[in-house]
Amino acid sequence: MDSSLLNFPWLTTIIFLPLAGVFAVLLSDYRNARSSQVIGLVFSSLTLLLCLVVVNMFPGTGEMAFTEAHSWIPSLGAKYLLGMDGISLLMVFLTALLTVLSLIGSWDEFGERSGLFVMLMLSLETGVLGVFLALDLLLFYIFWEAMLIPMYFLIGIYGGPKRFYATTKFVLVTLFGSLLMLLAIAVLAIWHQKQFGAMSFALADLLKVTLPSDIGWYCCLAFLLAFAIKVPMWPVHTWLPDAHTEAPTAGSVMLAGVLLKMGTYGMLRFLIPLFPEVIFSIIPWLLGFSVIAIIYGSLTAMVQQDIKRLVACSSVSHMGFVTLGIFSLTPIGLMGGTVQMVNHGISTGALFLMAGMIHHRTHTRIIDELGGLAKAMPVFSTIFVFFCFSSIGLPGLNGFIGEFLILLGAFSVSKKFTAVAALGIVLGAVYLLWMVQRVIFGPLKGLGAAHGNDSHAAHDSHAPKNSHDDHSHESACVSNEHDLNFREFAALLPLIIGVLYIGIYPTPVIDLARPPVKKILSGYQERLKLDTESTKNKSTIQAPNNKVPQGGEEGTK
Amino acid sequence: MNLAVVFTFLLPLCGALINGFLGQWFRKDSGTVAGTIMFGSFMCALIAFFQNQASPIPSFTLWHWFPISDTYTADMRILVDHLSLTMAVMVTGVGFLIHVFAVGYMDHEAAPERFFCYLNFFVVNMLLLVFSDNLVMMFVFWEGVGLMSYLLIGFWYYKPEAASAGKKAFVMNRVGDTGFVLAIFWLFYYFHTFNILEIAGKVKELPESVVTGITLLLFLAVTGKSAQLPLFTWLPDAMEGPTPVSALIHAATMVTAGIYMVTRNHALFNLYPNDPAHMVILTVGALTALVAAAIALGQNDIKKVLAYSTVSQLGFMVMALGVGCYIQAVFHLLTHACFKALLFLTAGAVIYGMHHEQDMTKMGGLAKRMPMTAACFIIGCLALAGFPLTAGYFSKDAILSAVLLKDHPYAWAAGLLAAVFTGFYSTRAVWLTFFGEWRSSHAPDHIHETPRVMLMPLMILAVLALGAGFAGWPEGSGMLYKYLEVTVKQPELKGHLSMANWLATILPGLIGIALGLFFYARGKSPAPVVALFGPIGNWFVQKLYLDEIYEFLIVEPTKIFAQACYYIGDKAMIDGFLHSWYNVCAFGGSRMRRLHSGHLHATLASFLAGVVALFAYILVRGY
C-alpha cells in the first residue's frame, strides 16, 4: 500500500468532518432548514464514504491502524492519540451510517427548526466518533463528555412532552458516573508519574501502571460505574427508558444505536485491559447483573404501553446480552458481544426509526390506540415485523449470530447463568410479538387521527368473521397512501441489508472483531498471571472462584 | 455438490422470491407458479433419491457460515443419506399435492401470492432442516419453519384470534427451543463441533448424567415443535390458519420435525437406553397420545378434532422414540403424513364447500352432495383408526408391538386405549359430517362436489393412505426398514408377540369404530359422548382447562412480576432513590440559598462567625 495514503490523517478527518459540517451550516444560513439539511447530509455522507475508504484499507490485524500521535498538553503529558482496530472500525462505521440514516429519517420532522437540529446531530457524531478512536484517556474523556452536550439539547429541545425531566435525568446520571471516571483517570496518570517519572494519559502507558490493590479497586469501580451507566447495566438503567422515549426519533436512534455502545466499547478498550485482576475477582457479579438485565429488561418491556418505551426497555435486555458476552471473557463470548453491539445498533435503530414513522402518521405511539397497520401499510408492516424478528434473534438474521456466540461463550463459564439468560430469548419473543400482534395485526385503528371518518368505516367493516369476503372488501377501501414513501424506504434499506448480511454471511464482521478480541484477552490473561504471581503472598485480591479464566477452546477434552 | 439435491430446495426458494416480489402482478396465477415449482422440486428429490441408490451422494458445503474459533467454522452443509432423502421425498411430494389443493382453496383470496410465497418458503426451511449436517444449521431451519408457521397461522392477520394463535405458537416453540440451544452448547462444550455425525462418533466419551441432561434438553425442544405435553396447546389454536397450512405444516411436516431430530441424533439417544430420559420420553408420549385422543372425543370443530388427533398420533411416534424404535417412529411419521394430510385437505374441501363453516354439529348428510370427498375422508379416517391393512394399521401396530416387546405394558395399555378413542372420534367425525340429517339452519342447496383441482390431490393421497403401509411390511424387515437401517442404527427387537397380544393391538381401532357407530349412526344427538360422563367428560371437552391453567400459573404471574419490576423496581425503588437524592440536593440548595440573602450585615455576621470558629479550632487543637 502507498505509504502516503497510510500517513494521511484519516481518523482526524473522519472525526472532525461532521464538525466542519456544523461550521458550514453556520456559514450558510442555519435558519434555512432545507439548505442546512442538505449540508448536513452531504457532510455526514462524506464521513460515511471516508469510513468505507478506511474499511477498504484496513489491515485487519489486531494492532491499532491509522495511528496518529501529536503532543497536546505537554505539561500534563496528554497527547492527541488516535487509532483504530476492528472493534472501533465497526463502531465508527455504525455511527457514520446511523447518523446519515437518522438525518434522512427525520427529514420532515422539524420543519423550520431543522437547522439547529442538523448542527446538533453533526456535533454529536463528532463526539461519538472521537470516543471510538481516542487512545489517550484524557482525549477520550473529553469526547465522552462533549457528546453529552448536543444530546442534552437534542432531547431537551426536540423531545416529547416530558423532555426536560428526561434530559436532565440523562445528563445528571451520566455525569455522575463519568466524573468519577475522570478522577480515576487522574489517579492513573499520577501513579504513572510515580512509577515512571512523567504524567501520561496514553492507554499504552497506563497499561504498565500497577496500582495498589485498594486504589485499583476504587479506580476500577469508577470506570465500571461510568461505563455501566452508559450501557446501561441493571440497576443503573432507569435513565434510558425516559431518555429514549422523550428523545426525537433521530435522538433515539443515536442513543440506542451508538451511545449505548460507548459503554461496552469502554469496557472492552479500557476497563478490562486496565484492571484485569479486579474484574476477574468480580466476574460472577458482573455476569449476574448481566443476566438480571436480560430478564428484567424483557419483563419491563412486556408491560410498556408506548412502542418507543418498549423498544427502549428491550435495549436493556439486549445490552445485557452484550455485557454477558464481554464478561464471559472467552474469545467466543467477546466476539459475540462485539457482533451484538453492531446488531443492536442496526435492529434497535431501525425499530426506533419505524416507531417514529408510526408516530408521524398516527400521532400516537400508544399500543392500545393502534392496530391492524398491516392492512393500510403492508410494506411498512413487513419491514417492521422483519426488524422485530431480527431483534428477537431469529436464525438467519443478525441478532441470532450475536446471541448465539454470547451464550455459547458464556456456557463454558457458567451453565446456570446461561440457562437463565436463554430464557431471555423466550421473553424477547413474548414482548415483541405481542406488540406486533397488537400494532400490526388485528382490526385497523389508529390512523383515524389523520383521516377522521375514514377509519371508522374501516373499523366497522372488520367485524364479520368471514375472512375471505372481508379481505377483498378491505383491500378495496384502504389505499396505501400511508405506506412507506421513498425517503423512508431509503432510510431503512441499508439496515435491511445489514440485517441480512450479518445474518447470512457474518464472517467478515466476525473476522474484524476476532484479532482485537484475542489481543484483549491475551493481554488480560498475561496481566492476570503476572498479578496473581506477584500478589500471591499478599492475597489482597481474593478470586471468588479458583478457576483459571477459561478460553472457549478449553472445553475440548 | 449434487445438483438434484440443490435444486430440491433452490426451486422453492426461487418460487418464494418470485411470488414475494413479483407476485402482485400475476395474482391469479401465483398458485400455479408455486405448484409447478413444487412439482419440479419433487422431481429433483426423486432424482436425488434414485441417484443415491445408484451411488451414495456425498455431503457438501453450501457456504461457510460463521467462524466460532480459529479452528472451527459453523457451516451451511448438506447431509444426504437415506433418512434425509426419505424425508425430502415425503416433504416435497405431500407439499406438492397440498400446493395443488391450495390453488383451488385460495382462489377467492385477494392476495394469494403472499400465501404461496410463505408456503414455498416453508418448504425451503423444512427441506434444509431435513438436510442439515450440523445442529446449528438444523436449529436455524427449526426456527425457520417456526417463523413460517407463525406467518401462516396469522395469514388472516386481521382476525384477532389468528394473530394471537400465531404468537402463541411461536412463543411456546421458543420455550422448547431454549432446550435445543442449551443442548447444542453442552455438546459443543465437550466436542467442539456441531456436526451430527462427528458427535455421534465421539458420543461414547460422555458420562451418563450428561447424556441424560442433553437428551432431556433436546426432548424439551421436541415437546414444543412436535406438540407434546405440556407444550401442545399451541397446535389446536394453530388451526386458525388456512386449511392447506394445517395439512402441510401442522400435520404432515413441521410438527414431525421433532421426531426427525431425535432420529437424526439417535446415536446420542441410543447410548443409555434405560436412563431416566427414556422413561420421560415414553411417559410423555403415552400420556400425550391418550390425553389428546380423549380431548378429541369432545370437539365439535372438525379441524380441532383433527388437530388433537395429530397431537395424539405424534404421541405414538414419541412413544416409539422412547423405546428406541426410531424406524417405527419414522414409518408412522410417513404414513401419518399421508393420511392426516388427506384428512385435513378433505376437511378443507368440506369447509370450502360449506363456505367456512367448521362446526360438525351444523353439517350432516354431506355424502350425498360430495360423494368423492366423503370417500376420501372415510379412507383417511380408516387409516387413522388403524383399520386392518390401511397405512395407519401397519405403522401404529409396529409401534404398539415394539412398546410391548420392550416390556412397557403400561405405555402399551395407554396406547391401546388411545387407539380405541381414535377409532371412536374418527367415526364420529365421519358420521356427523357426511351422514345423518342436515342440521344447519341454512338450506344446503349451494353445497356441491369439490372442484377437480382440489379433488385430484385428495385421490392421490387416498391411494397412499390405503397402500403406503406395505412399505413397512412385514414388520421389522419390510422395504422401509431395510432402507433406513443403513442410516439409523437401532437395537433389534427380540422375540415375537403372541397371538393374543397381536389381537390386542388390532382390536382397539375396530372397537372404537364399532362404538362410534353405535352412538352416532342411530342419528340421535351430535353432542359429544364424553359429555355424558358429567364433570370428567366436561373436563375433556374443555381441553383439560390447560390453557386456563397456564394462564393462571404462568402467564398471569409473569405479567404481575413484570408489572412489579417496572412499577416497583424501576419507578418506586431505583427512580425513587434517584429522586430522593435530587430532593436532598434541592432541599439543601434551597436552605443554603438563604445564606446568600444579599444583606451586608448578614454576610459580615457569618464571616465573623467563621473567623471565630477558626480561631476556636486552632486554640483547642493547637497548630
Image (tube, coloured by chain):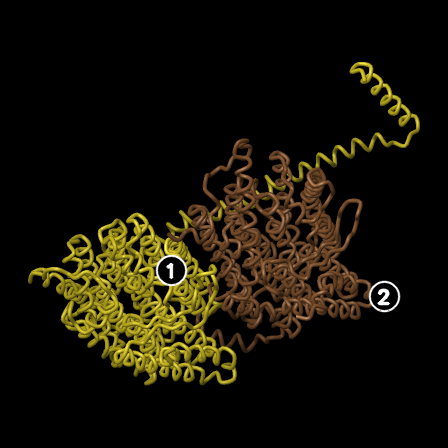
Chain colours: A brown, B yellow
Same-chain status of marks 1 and 2 = no
Asked if one can make out residue A312 in the rendered structure from this viewpoint, the answer is: yes
Q: Is residue B373 visible?
A: no
Q: Residue at 9%, 63% (x, y): give it.
A: B503
Percent from the top left, x then y, of residue B303?
Answer: 33, 67
Q: Which mark is residue A27?
A: 2
Farthest left residue in view: B499
On the picture, is B280 further left or further right than A233? left
- From what the image shows, is residue B29 above or below residue A94? below
Question: In terms of secondary structure, where does tag 1 sit?
Answer: helix
Mark 1 vs mark 2: in front: 2
| Residue B101 at x, y percent in the picture | 35, 79
Report helix, strand or loop for mark 2: helix
Q: For the residue carrying disc 2, how many other residues have a C-alpha within 10 Å: few (<14), some (14-19), or many (20+)?
A: few
Q: Amino acid at mark 2?
A: Leu
Q: Quadrant of residue B367?
A: bottom left
Q: Chain of mark 2?
A: A
Marked residue chain, label 1: B
Q: Position of residue B152 (x, y in %)?
A: 43, 69
Q: The C terminus of chain B is located in which quarter? A: top right
Report the front residue among B542 and A238.
Answer: A238
Which residue, given by chain and number where applicable, does mark 1 sit on?
B234
For the residues labelled 1 and 2, the Cα–Cα distance comes to: 63 Å
- Above or below A303: residue A347: below
